[in-house]
Image: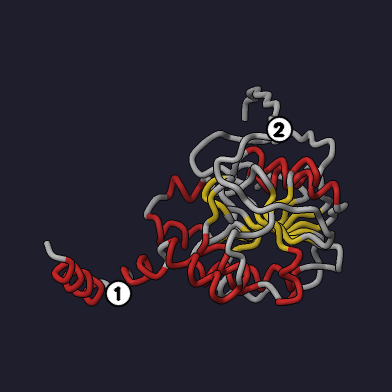
Amino acid sequence: MSKINKFFKAVGRICRHPYLLNLVLQDEDTMREETVRRHGFADGLPVIEINQLFPNFAETAEPYAYLSGATMPIDIALLRGLAKKYEVNDYFEIGTWRGESVANLAAVAQHCVTFNLPMDKIVELTHDQRYANLHSFFSKNLDNVEQLYGDSQTFDFKPHFGKYDMVFVDGDHHTEAVKRDTETAFRLLKNERSIIVWHDYALDPETIRWNVLSAILDGTPADKRGHLYHVSNTLCAVYLPDDFTTHTLVPYETPKKYFKVEISTHEC
């Protein structure tokens, strides 16, 4: 098939199914070019080495299910480490799956709030009651975890503005949703020492997810962008009030450190 025939076939499919245009617009190469054009950051966010952030990094991720859709253990360990470093008392999370991340933070912070779609909306979107029932599995019975329900794109967060030491953004990863959640996250922060963590900023620890980076930059106040970082070895971007020595992300970098991983099982 000639290129021109492919072009008209593609246009025809987009006309019949307009949602396909989003797939074209969010192509990673396209998103990278657009992000660099509008914001710079040609190499993504500056990278903080995790052992600079925590000189004696040693955390335990518990509970952790090792099942589909789980956050990487290193990302949960990062959340716990940051909560300790920045003395987090009040924690807010946008997006909950089985509740592993907030259950881990509940062991560190005094008060945790987790926000997710209501059960009936999850069933409507997925047609899977079993999947819906698993949401908040690890966190629903914890005394210091408060569960809120709604759509983060339309929910009225005003009663929560200015109340949280740490916000974790791990909801809908489409560009507009991440932008809106980022704007919300900054309004939720308590003071100048409060922090934000975005999950899935990267596809893997060495590969940037450009639509998410673009949305983070769009949703972050211009005067705060200089404190956005990617934490090495994780999928996470962070907003931290401190200045750090950083470096550019280098794919297939020669390892400078390694981690010791200990695994044990416990009955639920």
Q: CA distance from mark 2 to mark 1?
A: 47 Å
- Of badges 2 and 1, nearer the viewer stands 2
Q: Which residue lies at the image location 83% right of the left edge and 62% below the top edge?
A: 241
Label placed on residue 18: 1
Tag 2 and tag 1, C-beta contact below 8 Å = no
Q: Nearer the viewer, residue 186 or 33?
A: 33
Q: Nearer the viewer, residue 144 or 103?
A: 103
In the picture as drawn, the residue positioned furthest to the left comes out as 1
Q: Which quadrant of the structure image shows residue 52?
A: top right
Locate residue 53, reporting x and y percent.
Answer: 80, 47
Between 266 and 219, the one lying in front of the other is 219
Residue sitting at x 68%, y 43%: 76
Give the side of residue 123 with respect to residue 168, left or right. left
Q: Residue at x 71, y 62 (%)?
A: 228
Tell me which amino acid carries mark 1.
Answer: Pro
Residue 151, visible in the rendered structure: no
Q: Which quadrant is the N terminus positioned in?
A: bottom left
Q: Residue at x 84, y 54 (%)?
A: 88
Lateral position of residue 38 relative to residue 246, left or right: left
Q: How is the image coloured?
A: secondary structure
Q: Is residue 183 above or below residue 131?
A: below
Three-letter amino acid code of the residue under disc 2? Lys
Residue indicated by mark 2: 257
Mark 2 element type: loop
x, y percentage for residue 221? Answer: 71, 76
